[in-house]
Amino acid sequence: MTTGVVVAVFLAAALICVGTAFGSWRRRDVTPAATALAVLLSGAATWAASAGVLHAGMPPVLEQALVVLAYPAKHVMIAATVMLSWAVVDPAWRPRRRTVVGLSIVPVLVTLVAATNPLHGQFFRAIAPTGVYPEVEFGPAFWAHTAYSYALLGYILVRLGREWWRASSIFRKQIGSIILATLLPTGLNAVTLSQRVIFHGVDYTPVFFVFTGALMARALFRQGLLQVVPVARSQVVDTLEDAVLVIDHSGRLVDANTAARSLVRGLRKDLPEEIVGLSADEIFHHEAVRPLLEDNCQRTLELARGLHMDLRSRVHLDDRGHLLARVVTARDVSDLVLADRRLREQLSTIQDLQERLQEDAIRDPLTGLHNRRHLMAVLDAVLATGDQVGLVILDVDHFKSVNDTHGHQTGDDVLVAVAHSLLEGTREGDTVARYGGEEFVVLLPGAGVEATMRRAEQIRARCQATKVPIIVGEDPRTLSVTISAGVAVHPADGADARALVAAADAALYAAKAGGRNRVVCATS
């Protein structure tokens, strides 16, 4: 191959590497590996360009300078390849200053040793122009540099190989492309160093980085961005109102649409601006949200005051059943939750009103006691048990006279006062009802004749002690109240409700006929 062709090949390779590096740099926001690829190809372009100029024929001093220039470029490429492999294995990885400084130490030392070689001869024993390419005899410092370089390349290949073995099929294609892209120039360089005669002393390693750049760019930008997202940032997903977050098999956030970014930034102001690459544990720190990272689930949580989100997690597996990704979606359901809460409040209010209406339907509006309808329903139920039942019917004495003399308002006050007296002596299970007009009924389940008579007498005494305040003219006075009561007991005085009430009613009339303010039993 003529000198002109060799020069053209190297310069063309340099231009292609520069173009690919520029394209990678423009897409550095897509994946952190893009920045590493741009730096790698910039170093390759520098190496190829210096080799091309060197082949064109230069003065010895310039030739030596160009030979030295290639070595910092090579180390920059190796360091960039290390960083690219880290970004591939862990999408959350970001270069730290300590890492960059650590990877820069050896390149700086190699550059200093190579540049000062005329003083010590430890890097090159001799650089002599012999034909197309200057013949170089390497020293111990060069072989130390070579061992270090191959050690790093071996580390890169081992790490990528382990990740390839663990990865699912979709990741294997991407990682395999990067492994192949790393092996091509590495293998060629090894052959060149060991068998320089094959290529007539010409090291074509930088030319092969054209293929390395193409393979790596394809892996990064055409094979899924090294993420589980099948297409690169689809506009459809980005314009969804629902937040969508994709977590890879290692527990890192590998994708988030615009809604997800806004949601996370609003809730977690302590997180960095770029959330892609962060650990899912950092983002989903709330204890109630952690189940989303464990299995398919759905929860509605109040993530902030008034912000209710419907959170759903779905696991996606590859064709071998291995975890491919976990997709978490979040939908703002605050309006729905508020509407549901209002609906529940309305239903509760309606239920309360219904219960109140039902209660009002069985209550006497004046006294608050149960009405006759409720009394008869309870009486039928109690009689159905077959147990003893005591029934007291009582009537306010001279009630018509009270209405005629003092007015209906005073009459109402008397009825209310009697109702309060009746309630004061009730026990659990008793039923007190206004039967109609000035008549009241007290139902005593389980009470026999003696117990019912005793309770009736207590009621009569309490009513007699009741004083109702009235106004006569302008003078405040009190009105005494007495009652007459009739007592009947099931089953002796009646087998059914109708017969029992009739017996008690007859006893009541007997009490009134006997002078009022007394209790009469139907069996006496």
Image (tube, rainbow, N blue to C red):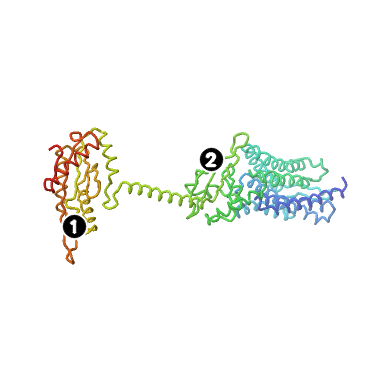
Give the SS element for disc 2: loop
**Pointer 2 with pointer 1, Cβ within 8 A:** no
- Is residue 415 found left or right of 140 in the rendered image? left
Q: Quadrant of the N terminus?
A: top right
Type of amino acid at the residue the image marks with label 1 = Val
- Is residue 436 found left or right of 31 in the rendered image? left
Type of amino acid at the residue the image marks with label 2 = Asn
Q: Earlier in the sequence, mark 2 or mark 1?
A: 2
Name the foreground residue: 388 vs 101. Answer: 388
- The x and y percentages for residue 100 are 63, 53
CA neighbours of label 2 inside 10 A, class few (<14), some (14 to 19), many (20+): some
- Is residue 404 found left or right of 209 in the rendered image? left
Which residue in the structure is indicated by mark 2? 296
Name the foreground residue: 494 vs 151. Answer: 494
Which residue in the structure is indicated by mark 1? 468
Compute the Cα span from label 2 to label 1: 72 Å
- The x and y percentages for residue 220 are 69, 46
Give the SS element for disc 1: strand
- The x and y percentages for residue 495 are 22, 33
Identify the mark at residue 21; answer none if there is no mark.
none
Name the foreground residue: 227 vs 296. Answer: 296
Nearest-to-viewer mark from 2 and 1: 1
